[in-house]
Image (cartoon, rainbow, N blue to C red):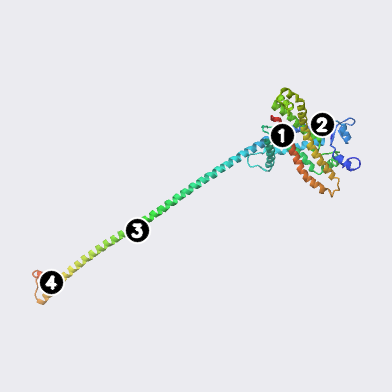
Amino acid sequence: MNMNATLIGQAISFFIFVLFCMKFVWPPIITSLRERQARIADGLAAAEQSSQRREEAEAEIATMLEDAKAQAAEIVAQAQKRSNEIVEASKDTARTEAERIKATASAEIEQEVVNAREGLRQQVGSIAVEGARKILGSEVNAESHAKVIDDLVGQI
Amino acid sequence: MAGEGALTPTGYIQHHLQNLVVGFHPENGFSLAKSSEEAAAMGFWAIHLDSMFWSVGLGALFLFIFKKAADRATSGVPGGLQNFVESIVEFVDENVRDTMSVKSNFVGPLALTIFVWVFLMNLMDLIPVDFIPYFFEHILGVPYMKIVPSTDVNVTFGISLSVFALMIYFGIKMKGLGGFLGELAFNPFTSDNVVIKWLFVPFNVLLEGVSLLAKPVSLALRLFGNMYAGELIFILIALLPWFAQWALSVPWAIFHILVITLQAFIFMMLTIVYMAMAHEHH
């Protein structure tokens, strides 16, 4: 345990090491540490903020969804009601149309029947006149006997 | 193994505890000391080559690794080396900031240098005691090689006296010469009465002077004593037969991992405390 100049050598190298450390080693590492700390803090704050925003958006979405559902239900109900109305209205229209067509048709049939009856009546008249002429052997004057024939025809 | 004479346990131990000294011998001139007597005869102006070599080498290794990490330091995702270096730097920085209320750009690097450097020097203790000395003696022909710089009292005093000088420098710089001397003279005994206050000065100077001077001495001797004792026990274990050594050296080495870390930490922590005391007013 003898003290000698090693002591001075050690002290000198120690100071050189410390100064080197202070100049080139400590500042960059500490700076990067601080910067990373700041960045992590920022990142955490941002994450916090965005999760909060997401929650808000989710709540908004939920209310919007609810509204949309209610609206959809309302629309469906309206549509149903409207379709029922339309069905009812068309049924009515169809019914009146059918009745109208039926009425026209029966009127036409009536008319036809009348016409046919008239035609038949006239034919029967002329046949009767022809028959009578043949039976009497003389010509029956259609014009002079028209009144009689018409009466007969009216009786058919 | 002992260079000259019989391989006695005493010779072996003494050989292991002898530094490689270079200096000016009264008879041989400028030379390497061949024995401890020659080394003692060289007086103060001799140098322990082995201590200087290993301590400067380890300090350079420390700065090389940390500089490499510092050059590539980013605030982004750190790599493995950066992670490792940053964890140490942050540990030291935390201790500095917890201890010192005054901000300082110097104490952090100072504490980091002390912690890592002292740790690396202590770490040499875990290398088996004969490996490197044997290589130097039988391959390179160097008679002595003590590879643990912190078992050299010159090394520990070199650091602790530097810390002492820094304490005084910062004490005077921060408080002024009057403030610094006032702390020595008017503490711990003081009085409102001016006469009594000045009467206390001799006692205070004595007390404070002793406590001030005790700081570097205790700092250096604590580290030196722990490492020297640890090294000595490794050497004693090495005297056992080769097949039995592991039974003692392994537990002691494991325990020593704790000791070397703790001693490095204590040296750093006390340095920070002394620096804090020098920076702050009481």
Check disc 3 and report the residue beneath it. A87
Q: Nearer the viewer, mark 1 or mark 3?
A: 1
CA separation in Å, label 4 and label 3: 57 Å
Where residue B72 appears, as percent x and y from the top left, is 67, 39
Where residue B50 appears, as percent x and y from the top left, is 82, 37
Element at label 4: helix
Query: Do marks 1 and 3 share a subunit?
Result: no
Q: Amino acid at mark 2?
A: Ala
CA separation in Å, label 1 and label 3: 97 Å
Return the residue found at the far right: B5
Q: Amino acid at mark 1?
A: Val
Camera-side residue of A144 and A65: A65
Check disc 2 and report the residue beneath it. A5
> Which mark is first along the chain, 2 or 4?
2
Check disc 1 and report the residue beneath it. B273
Q: Quadrant of residue B128?
A: top right
| Mark 3 closeness class: few <14, some 14–19, many ≥20 residues within 10 Å | few
CA separation in Å, label 1 and label 4: 154 Å
